Image (cartoon, rainbow, N blue to C red):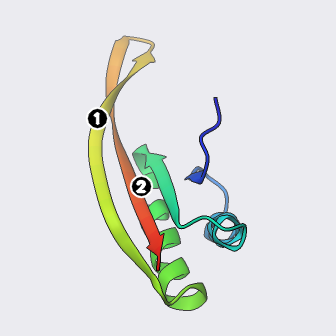
Amino acid sequence: MIEDNVVYVGNKPVMNYVLAVVTQFNAGAKEVTIKARGRAISRAVDVTEVTKHRFLTGATVKDIKIGTEKMPSAGGETNISIIEIVLNLD
């Protein structure tokens, strides 16, 4: 299931995700959610800051949600941190 106006941040370079966010806004989106988990959380914050300061200076952070998900691992389950950053363009 693919959600509209959501960019999932992983291991690619920051600019790849910035381009995805800017593309969503150029397509008419008023809000874009940037989601990441684990070590990609810092990259999601970088994507947000680069987008706000270099490409879409009118964008603001509407909401930030943090939490924990249980992921299957070799020893059973492990907890992994998640973040969701909602960017709004007025």
Is any part of residue 72 visible from this angle? yes
Residue 84 appears at what percent x and percent y? 39, 52
Evaluate if marks 1 and 2 touch, with contact meaning CB atoms under 8 Å apart.
no
**Which numbered disc, 1 or 2, marks the residue that appears first in the sequence?**
2
Q: Quadrant of the N terminus?
A: top right
| Residue at 61% from the left image edge and 47% from the top image edge | 4
The image quadrant of residue 76 is top left
| Residue 41, numbered label | 2
Circle 1 SS class: strand
Residue 13 appears at what percent x and percent y? 66, 65
| Residue 68, numbered label | 1
Residue 11 appears at what percent x and percent y? 61, 52
Residue 45 appears at what percent x and percent y? 42, 67
| Residue 55, numbered label | none
Q: What is the three-letter code of the residue carrying label 2?
A: Ile
Vertical placement of residue 90 versus 42, above or below: below
| Residue at 59% from the left image edge and 40% from the top image edge | 3
Q: Residue furthest top?
A: 76
The residue closer to the viewer here, 77 or 36, is: 36
| Residue at 60% from the left image edge and 86% from the top image edge | 55
The residue closer to the viewer here, 45 or 77, is: 45
The residue closer to the viewer here, 76 or 49, is: 49
Q: What is the three-letter code of the residue carrying label 1?
A: Thr
The image quadrant of residue 24 is bottom right
Q: Is residue 89 left or right of residue 3?
A: left
